[in-house]
Image (spheres, rainbow, N blue to C red):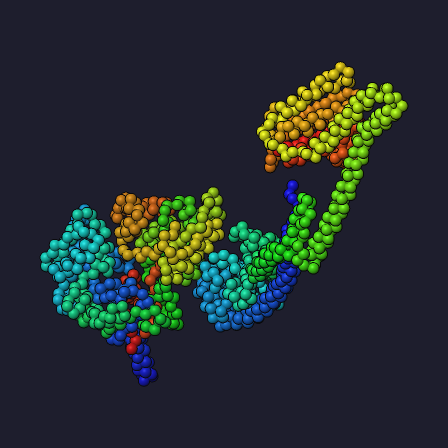
Amino acid sequence: MGGPVSFRTKVFLSITTTVVISVWIVASVVSTLVTNSFERQDSQRTAALVSQFRSEFDRRSTEVARRVDAIANSETVQRLALNLGTSRIDTAQYYDAAQALAKEQSLNFLELAGSDGSIISSAEWPARFGYKETWLLQPIDWKTQGVFLQREELADGPALGLMTVRALNAGDGLLYVAGGQRLDKAFLDSLPPAPGMNIRLVRDFDAPASSDDPVSKLTAALIQNVRQKPRELSFTGSDVTLTAIPLLGRDQQLLAILMVENSRAELANLKTYIQGTAWIVGSAGVMLGLGFSFWAASRVTRPVRELASTVRDVAGGNWDARAPVESKDEVGQLAEDFNHMTEQLVEQRDRMIQAERVAAWRELARRLAHELKNPLFPLQITIENLQRARQASPDQFDEVFRESTTTLLAELDNLKTIVGRFSDFARMPAPHLETIDLNQIVQEVVKLFDPQIEAPDRPRILKILQLDDHLPAVAADPEQLRRALRNLVLNALDAMPKGGTLTLRTQRLDGPAERKVALEVSDTGEGLTPEECARLFTPYYTTKQHGTGLGLAIVQSVVSDHKGTITVRSEPGKGATFRIELKA
Amino acid sequence: MRLRAWAWLALSSIWAAYLPGATRPRFGGTLTVELSTGMLDPASPQGHLSVAIAETLVRVNARGSIEPQLALAWQHEPDYKRWRFSLRPKVAFHDGEMLNASSAAPALLAALKKKYSDATITYGGQTLVVQFEHAMPELLAELARPEAAIVRKTDTNPVVGTGPFRLVAWEPGRRISIAAFEGYWGGRPFLDSVVISLGAGPARADVFDIPFGSTRRVVPENTRIWASPPRELIALLAANPQSTLLQALSLAIDRAPIVNVLTQRRGDAAFGVLPQWLSGYAFLFQTAPDIARARQLISQLRLPAISLTYPANDSFVRAVADRIALNARDAGITIQPTTNSGGSLTLVRWPIESADAAAELIRLLGLLGAGEHAASIDPTKPETLFEAERALLDDHRLIPLVYLPELYGLGPRVHNSEAAQKRDPFRLNLENLWVDP
């Protein structure tokens, strides 16, 4: 799957990967450093706010104590205490006294209660007169108790108060003055939080989460944790960091939680900015890689491609092709070396051709000498016999002369035949192409050999024809094709002196680019060695005792003139198969 | 010895002469009156302060019964449709015109027509005949109301009556000045003049009102309080009859703290519609708060928060509403007081306008939309009033809470308020007061 990855793609991938990884690493490091810095800053801001809260808490505690003292020492309260002691008073007339006193001292909470805890007057909930505040009756030294947090029930729900209590002597009983300030939004508003911070008091621990958003869920989880074990605790979410500071009452019960919320929106924005920048830089890197890869390809791969094209030209036989040398770098050196190598190959080829030509001429000379030597020797003997007969037996000369001339003529015919064959090979004409039916050619040629195949004195040859019925017509010279096929059949029969199977096969070949036909001639003879296969089509090369070495050379010449190919596959002892492929 | 006897006689005479002189009414002087609310319209009654410019044919006496005023005598047909009144002779209006049937009839007819369209009047001499198409047993109570006063208008005086005082000046919404009417048929009042002004600041006048409502005045020391009998009912009304809820709420509300603390013991716990002085049977409706029972009643109900509407700018009613909400909370009922209208419950202040129990009960039943209970009322049979009121309470449409009197503070210059109250316990009659110089 997939072809080889181009150099340009490799350069592109390398640059892109390098840029992206570098940008990612830088972005990650910067993001981590920014996150750490923000968290450190959040922690410091939270600590500062909590410290400010405690300071304000202490300041207000002192203020509450002072104001409650002022109320306890006021004429109204002192008179009430005095009258309570003498039992000469209807406390009803004091039922709204607390409101005025609380207003005078700017207190949110003020209750005046009798010895039994019954409220005489309540500023925060005037309607509660007569109800009992049982917590006032606890055995506590209110003088030393100081200011404490107290959950106060109000008409519109519970509230948190910074309270203190004064117990005044009223005859045999006591008059309780319980006053304080509300720990509410106004209190929190006096603590200006830093931008991005938000503080609030959580009093209703069982209130359901306002929504399903992550901050609400985080808040609910934090509250539950602090409820289980009251202590300062922080949770960090994706959008916010929450810090819970438990606010405990007089009996160390958890009354409220001061929730400090540090928004991480700025951090998220910065992270988004970093990510965006990383994306932009990464994208720019990719684009840069793309551009550089094109540039590098133009600088590196174009010479390589040109070199490759030159290589293909050379491989295709264009030995004059040369790679352009445009630089002095490695590619230029490579092109130069290639050109040098090509020149050396051309020289070697020329030398080889020359050597092969010499060898061919030698082979031709040898064959000619061999071929001519056979008829020449009888000619010489015959002529010498004729001379000896003239001198020694003139009476028998005529008979000898007749016999000798017969022999001479026969041998001269033989010489003539030999010379004719060479002459034929030399005079191979250009093919006259016609549209032919190859199957028909095959059947005609085989039919010529039927007498020879079926001759009773020959070993039995089994003839098999496997002809493709859908074979397309072929443009070829029928006579030359018959001649080539005859040579192949003749060779096959010669290769099977002890009999065997001759197979002729035609086949339709439908390739992606063109359509071809194949013709195979197979024998079951002795077969050929690889070396024989390599030299088989060399003119004048033969493996036979009396062959001229021109048969297969003629076949190859015919096939080549028809723009076809011929191949042989053979193994010793397993016969041989010649395959011709022609364009349909 | 004789000398000593004369000396003793002289001292005794001086002492005897001095003592009565200390309580002897003093003629003259101007009484200042400051009211915190009201229209300050001479043609309208100023609460229970009897300015007494105009007078009615009859009036309610200290025992709560009707007695003659401008009418000396009256008779009615057995079916109470026709009434005959004989007017008091030698009564003059402030402009000198004498009172007779022809001068009294227009004002009387106009007052009656406002409520009873079938009223007609015929007259002659000193006799007025009032005719209705329906029985009017409560007519005397109607005629005792200030709205039925006999007044006239002139070009220069919007209110010309027969009362002990005549209108001298009137600045609408700010001040009324009245002066003693020398020709008053009952005798000249002690005071030369009275100036009534409107203001909500600290009380500095000789007489000032002490409302339970929007303004709680700082009452100066040495101030005596004049209180009328209960003349106002504060009750809780349900927009829709909710038997169980109202029953539970009624049991949850403790009226004693409201009376003792919020009214400073000047109000009375209300368990019925009509106060005891008016009906005589109100004590029969008394119940005690029972939080446990209230909780039990609503235990099967799923009650949402109930809104309780109370009049805006009325701190007293707001305090009552808050206390009710607190009591209800103890019983497990959530009530949210609000000044927005349309609440499931409404806290109302109803003035008791009539001294006639039957008339007042019928009027209140009409206001409640419970007129079906009024049909069984027979003014001559008090038991029918009780039955009608009990049926109304059993409907659980309202919960009576507290009756309020009207309170006035009297400064140290003011005298004779006790005598005035004996004559008319329901109004502070200025004509009986006299002041130190």
To which quarter of the image does residue A60 belong?
bottom right
Q: Which residue is depicted at the point 45% across and 65% down? A: A96
Q: Quadrant of residue B154?
A: bottom left
A436 or B52: nearer the eye? Answer: A436
* Residue A263 picture location, percent across and down: 56, 60
Quadrant housing the N terminus of chain A: top right
In depth, the one of A189 and B204 nearer the eye is A189
Residue B258, image x, y percentages? 42, 58
Q: Is residue A171 visible?
A: no
Image side of residue A141 versus residue B224, left or right: right
Give residue B315's quadrant in the image: bottom left
How many labels were placed on the picture? 0
- Give the position of the C terminus of chain A as an image quadrant: top right
The relative height of residue B360 versus residue B416 in the rendered view (above or below) is above
Using the rendered image of the protein, determine whether residue A384 is visible from the camera's viewpoint. Answer: yes
Residue A6 placement (x, y as % from top left): 65, 49
Horizontal side of A128 relative to A302 (left or right) equals left
Closer to us: B210 or B28: B210
